[in-house]
Structure formats: structure tokens, C-alpha cells
Amino acid sequence: MDFNLTEDRQMLSDTVRRYLADQYDFKVRTAATASAPYHSAEKWEELSELGLIAAFVAQDKGGFGGTGFDIATVFEELGRGLCPEPMLAALMSARVAADCGAQTLVDEMIMGTRRFAFAVFEPDADGLSLIRASADKSDDGWVLNGRKSVVYGLPGADGVLVAARVEAEIGLFLVETPETIDYAMIDGGGAGELILDNTPAICLVEDAIQSIKASLDAGRLALCAEAVGVMQVLVDMTVEYLKQRKQFGRPIASFQALQHRAVDMAIEIEQCRSIAILAASKLGTDQAEKYVAMAKNLIGRAGTMIAEESIQLHGGIGMTWEYPGSHYAKRLVMIDHQLGDRYAQLQRVIEM
């Protein structure tokens, strides 16, 4: 397998990296996540104009990418830049809408004129089979009842794509006037609870289970790629700190025990990068679920190890709010818990 990016993807990667370095530094990130909607509407519009959302959608659906490698390219750079913009919600929303034939919504997302969240999981339902939110026909169309929990990108969204039960099936519905409880996530960005109480909705598809599964796996792949980007920056910061910090009259990077720990972190990154590439190559095939679950399990374990090692090697500064490394470490730990943690992914592999 050729691990090098194609010319188009390299251009996309370079564009996103330059933009985040020039326009979305740590101070901008801190300011953007300080208050609702916990991201920058101005920066969101600019990222849309760069074509990031179009990269998530296949050409025959109005985008210019849509493959696992396109998703991984964008999200690795978002991880490097520690960008809190709700791209995960945009990715899953665009994928599921495109798969269900809601082309008008897809076009609006690509152009950046409307932003949607994707609501699947519930307080007592961490799997699709446990979904209890219900959809019922009414005189004017459909109404939804139930509650969706930890909906990424919900604050300020123009609408929500909701997975709800239609008798024995799971359908996909559009809610344009959501009732929400918004909050900031501990590692940056926004999420919220979606309250459904006879809420009017538009039915997109009454049986969307396969589309929802595929979109969630695309989201998990994105998180894996983001984690690889976060890991690389965090290890680079740690090594640079070891070279600068002096003890007993010499840089602590000269101590062999610390060199071994830094090498262990670098090895973990390469394993994570390799399995993320493998998972990206399987997206869209009947093996996607298995390899994405395997990747997220490994990256969840390695991410926690790298985050903890980086904090220990930095010492006290690694825990401070002012130092960017602490935010990278926090994000890396939290990625494991999004869309099913390492234990949930291991259980998925066992059941296959």
C-alpha cells in the first residue's frame, strides 16, 4: 500500500494546515470556545469556503472526495491545529443526508449556508438497537418524542438530523426548530441535549439504519485521524521540551530513561497511523465496521498512554491551562470516549 498522499490530497492537507496556522492559533481557539456556540461562526464560514465539507462528500453527490482518505486527510490536520469547529457533526450529517438522498441539505452544507447536527445516541441508549426516541405520524406530518444526548455541534445548529424509531425500523428525520440544552465539552467545542416533545419533523427515510451505521463509522474514522494529528504535535512538543529543560546542568533529553519513553511514544504513533490508514482504505466496503472498530480501539489505548506520558515528561507545566500541551493531552483522552470508547469498539469486534 502506498502511504503517500495523492497530489490533490497533499494540496488539501497543506491548505488546511496553513489556514489553521495563520488564522486559528491557540488564542483564537481559546476565545472561540469560551462562550456559546463554542466555535467561531466566522471561521466556520471560511473553512466551508476552503472546501472542507465538500471533501466529505462524493463527486456524484456534489462534493469532490468522500473517500476514507479524504476524511482522514482533513481530520489529521484539524487534530494538528486542535480546531474546535464542529466538523465531526458536519461530516456525519453530510454523509447520512447524501446516503438518504437529501441532496438539498447536502448542497446547503457544502456551501456553508446551513449547519446541521446529527443526533443518534440517548441517555440510556449507546447503541442503535436501544434507541427509544419515537416517530409518529400526525395530521401535519411527523412528530418526534424522546431525548438525544451529547449531540456534537448542536449549539447554534440550523437543524438536526435525528435517528428515531418507526415501529421496528430506525428512520432519519429533520428537525428544524430544535429544543436544546447546550453546553461546552471539557476539551473544547460544543454539544447539547436534544429534547423531543411532540416536535414537528420531516421524514427523510423511514428505514435508514445502514446509512446511520455508515455515517457513524465515517465519524469514528475521522476521530482516529484527528487523534493521529494530535499525537504527533503532542510528541513533538514533548521532545522539544526535553531538549530545553535542564537538570543537573544538562538537558533532560540526554537522560537515557527519558529517551526510551519518548521512543515508545513515537512507536505508538506509527502503529496508530498505520491502522488509521488501513481503516480509511476499508471505508465504504463491507469490512469497514470491523477495521474502524479495531482502529479506534488501538488509538484509544495509545492515545491515553501518550497523553499521560507527555504530562509526566513535562512535569507541572503539562497541567497548566496556559500551556497548549495540556489541551492537546485532554483532547487526545476525550477522543477515545466519542462515538464509543475502546471497550465498546472491542465488543463490536468480538461480536462480528
Image: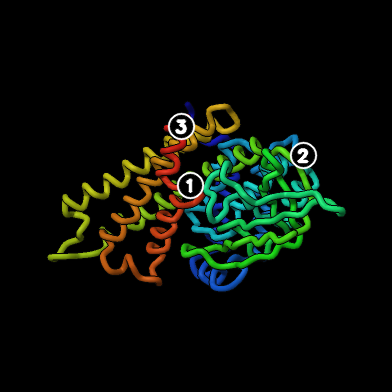
Q: Which residue is mark 3?
A: 351
Q: Nearer the viewer, residue 133 or 246?
A: 133
Disc 1 from disc 3: Cα separation: 15 Å
- Three-letter amino acid code at disc 1? Gly
- Name the mark nearer the viewer: 1 or 3: 3
Any part of residue 286 in sight: yes
Q: Which residue is mark 1?
A: 340
Q: How crowded is the residue under tag 1: few (<14 C-alpha within 10 Å), some, or many (20+)?
A: many
Q: Position of residue 115 (x, y in %)?
A: 70, 57
Residue located at (57% from left, 63% from top): 190
Q: Is residue 138 left or right of residue 89?
A: right
Disc 2 from disc 3: Cα separation: 30 Å
Q: How crowded is the residue under tag 3: few (<14 C-alpha within 10 Å), some, or many (20+)?
A: few
- Three-letter amino acid code at disc 2? Gly
On screen, residue 87 above or below 213: below
Q: Position of residue 112 (x, y in %)?
A: 73, 55
- Name the mark nearer the viewer: 2 or 3: 3
- Total labels drawn: 3
Residue located at (71% from left, 61% from top): 197
Residue located at (78% from left, 47% from top): 203
- Three-letter amino acid code at disc 3? Glu
Q: Position of residue 310 (x, y in %)?
A: 31, 57
Q: How crowded is the residue under tag 2: few (<14 C-alpha within 10 Å), some, or many (20+)?
A: few
Q: Which residue is mark 2?
A: 101
First in sequence: mark 2 or mark 3? 2
First in sequence: mark 1 or mark 3? 1
- Name the mark nearer the viewer: 2 or 1: 1
User: Mark number for residue 5?
Assistant: none
On screen, residue 168 above or below 149: above
